[in-house]
Each structure stands twice: as structure tokens, then as C-alpha cells.
Amino acid sequence: MNAFRRRSTGPSPLRSASRGTRAELDRDPRAVARMFDGVAARYDLTNTVLSFAQDVRWRRATRAALAVGPGDVVLDVAAGTGVSTVELARTGARCLATDFSLGMLRTGRARPATAGLPFVAADALHLPVPDASVDAVVISFGLRNTVDVDAALAEFARVTRPGGTLAVCEFSRPTWAPFRRLYTDYLMRALPRVATAVSSNPDAYVYLAESIRAWPDQAALAQRIAAAGWRSVAWRDLSGGIVALHTATRPS
């Protein structure tokens, strides 16, 4: 894909992980990359189990939110094993999967479903594409793991053409108080136990639960997206607000 070029970002933060690696809420890039290396082998299965198969619905909703089609270029940031990128490619757009976990990229490249999809190792804060070169940037469940959320949002704006689209699918805050209490209890107690049964690195899901609880709610994230230079910011709650799908437009 000649629309993309590599950008030097200095020494790579990527290293192989051992079982039991987890990150902390300071989101040190090296620790986060090692953690995702450690969960790569069973990452997709674990997500489906923990979300009660709602992850499929969330990916479809994200694809549907994009006004892209054949001839457009979509950058899937923090794409992991490329499951989200495969869904985005159903639009007919040219899609590039990026992630800073080499373990996730290796696992993704080995999957038959991703045959033909380009994978590139890249940090969300230093994307290897020129200014105003893509029609849409998508990040699903990855913005929460960046060391500098506001810098990442600004970087997404840099690479998106005027009039292009941003889609952020991320865990959020259930809107109904009784359900929110039930969900929080599941998140902090049951999720790590379920992860122990199915994940290749259950300790990583302790970080997952903590990072979701610390994440801003729908309105607060919308304000940060707007502050990074995006316009027409809106969101749609999915699964009762467990997940929120934010969309925005790059100003002309």
C-alpha cells in the first residue's frame, strides 16, 4: 500500500513476554506491549468469552459507523490480531492493521482470515503514515492503553484527511445505575476469575478491569476528542453503555 510509509520512532518498545506479565495504570508502553505479547495466543477467544460474544456485535457496529467504501483508506490502530481489521475490510476499503505488540501481529499474520491484510508495527502516538493520508482512523479497545490519550487523538487527526472520520470503540460507563453496579462487580471480581480459565495470561485481565474502571465516561471522552481538534463528536452506547462508540470528523 503505497499510501503508507514507515516513520522512525527510535528504539522499539517491543519485547517478548512471559506468562503472568501485566501492565499498571501508568501505561508504560514497554509493559503494555509485553502484556499483550503474553495474551496474544488466546486473545480473541478470551475476548469472546468475557464479553458473552458481544465483541462480534461491537465490531460490526464500528464498521457500520464509517462512511467508507472501495477506494478509501482505513487505518486500524491497536488492531491486535486483525480481527477488527477483517471486519473493516468488508466495506471494500483498503485497510492497514497497526499495533505495537509484536506478539499480537505475529498471531494475526498466522490467521487464515487475515490473508492479504498488511500488518505494521507502530505506536499510536507515532503512526507511520503521512499527514492527511487516510480517510478514516479506527481504534477499538486500544485508546485506553495509550500512555498519552490526548496525544494519540491529535496524531489520529494528523493522518486523517479533511472531512475524514474517526471511530473510537471503547469500554465505557453503563447508563442505568443498577446495571452499572452489577457490571462493576463482574468487572472487578468475576472477570479475573473467568480469565484464569481461558486466558494465556490471566494477570493481564486484572489490569483490564482496573483500566476500565479508571476510564472516563462517554461525555468526558467526547470532550477530549473535541479538544484534540475533531468536530461533530457523537457517541452511541452499546450493550447498555458497557461500550461506547464515539465518532468524529476531521475539520476541512
Image: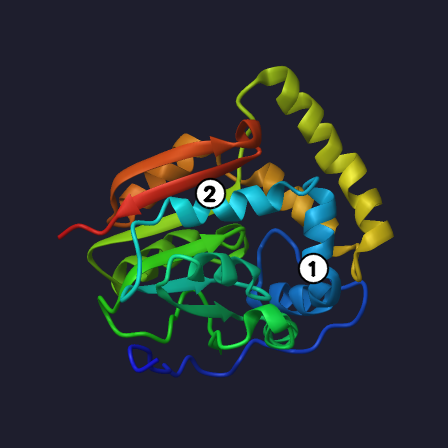
Q: Could you tell me which residue is drawn at 33 percent across and 62 percent down?
A: 155
> Quick check: 118 left or right of 185?
left
Q: Are marks 1 and 2 in contact (CB under 8 Å)?
A: no
Determine whether 192 is above or below 18 in the image: above
Foreground residue among 66 and 129: 66
Coordinates of residue 171 in the picture (x, y in percent):
55, 41
Q: Nearer the viewer, residue 239 or 38?
A: 239
* Residue identified by numbered label 1: 43
Q: Which residue is mark 2?
A: 61
Q: Secondary structure at mark 1?
A: helix
Number of numbered callouts drawn: 2
Q: Secondary structure at mark 2?
A: helix
Whether residue 197 is situated above or below residue 72 in the rendered picture: above
- Crowding near pointer 2: few (<14 within 10 Å), some, many (20+)? some
Where is residue 37 shown, x and y percent of the image? 68, 70
Q: Is residue 116 visible?
A: yes
Amino acid at dot 2? Ala
Q: CA distance from mark 1 to mark 2?
A: 20 Å
Colour scheme shown = rainbow
**Residue 22 in view (yes/no):** no
